[in-house]
Amino acid sequence: MTEGQISLIEVRLDRNEFQLDIRFEWQARSLVLFGASGSGKTTLLRVLLGLEPTAKARIRLAGTWLENREIGVNRPIHERRLGWVPQSPTLFPDRSVEENIRFGSARGRGKEGDDEDGQWISRAIEVCEIESLLKRNVEGLSGGERQRVALARAIATRPRALLLDEPMASLDVGLRSRILPYLLRIRDEFDLPLLYITHDPDEAILLGDEIAVLDRGRLIAQGPPKETLWSQSVHSLASGIGVENVLEMIGRSDGQADDGMSRRVESAAGLTLETPWPLEVGKSLTIGIRAEDILVSLDRPSRISARNVVGGRVVQIDVQAEDARVAVDVTGERLVAKLTAHAVSDLSLRPGSNVYLIIKSQALRRVR
């Protein structure tokens, strides 16, 4: 998305007992719409697509008005040129993978296609790594393969923006970890605004340049993903969904092997952890650690099985009823631990307290 172009969504929609009433602007390339089920995320995408004719809306994407009846603009669905991948994408079962993608391209452009269409199709196939699937019938594809085909088909339409409605929600953990790199590559390689719906904090942090948090049809917070998910207005919602600590790491030599592999990883800030799996030295990866998998101690423990014990300083404590979230600065990295309110009181924790975090290596989850 060209720098300086501001997108706007302003929507009001009344439907039985649910009301969507939202207005926000953003300039980031990748915007995550975050919230629990029923918060209005999918309804908002339907308004963007032009599928909710009773909605009162003003919509501008990357500087182009899609809907603003005050100035006489209300583009029909096909002229909005939005690539949409729903939770369970529908592919034509009687057509091959290649035919599905090419049909999407011609339909998206409203014509048979041109040289630039061919370039977009080729690029979509290459980025989603589905060259070997092109001649196959879609009925024989796995869930992950179908999702990659759906992503390629959406890209091949040469859309004005990509709208992804929880594209990994129906996949198991293993398939999600395999699909995520394709989403990251799409985000990084295509100059397209990306709107990504999720209720998974891990996905929000990895894929979003900015996050907009919805709750019961209202926007309750907006900003950088990590900071926004920790904010007071969002934390109770996010903690109920399961916020994760997400760290960018790189493999470092542990001096125990000469095959170029190691279980030691380090962040740019100097946080060092031991993983349960070997990693090539020098290779980058992203790991996630759930807040409930981090223990807090006032003293450095000894003779324990946990492989990771790191010292830090408490920077923030947020207590909600019986639960508490404690943010700790560890060599410049911010880690969040989930405790009970009683534990916080019993340990006399407060901002500035020096603590040790205990993390089992098995608690480290490789995200990508």
Image (cartoon, helix red, strand yellow):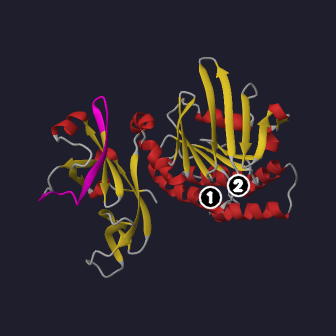
Residues 233 and 280: in front is 233
Identify which amino acid the numbered label 1 is placed on: Ile
* Stretch in magenta: 302-324
**Quarter in which the N terminus is drawn:** bottom right
9 up-or-down from 12: above or below: below
Q: Residue at x 70, y 34 (%)?
A: 47
135 up-or-down from 354: above or below: below
Residue 93 visible in this rendered orientation of the protein:
no
Per the image, label 1 sits on a secondary structure element best described as: helix
* Residue of label 1: 186
Pointers 1 and 2 in contact (C-beta within 8 Å) = yes
Q: Residue at x 60, y 51 (%)?
A: 30
Identify which amino acid the numbered label 2 is placed on: Ile
Name which quarter of the figure residue 121 lies in: bottom right
Residue 241, horizontal then vertical, whole percent: 42, 38
Residue 333 visible in this rendered orientation of the protein:
yes
* Residue of label 2: 155
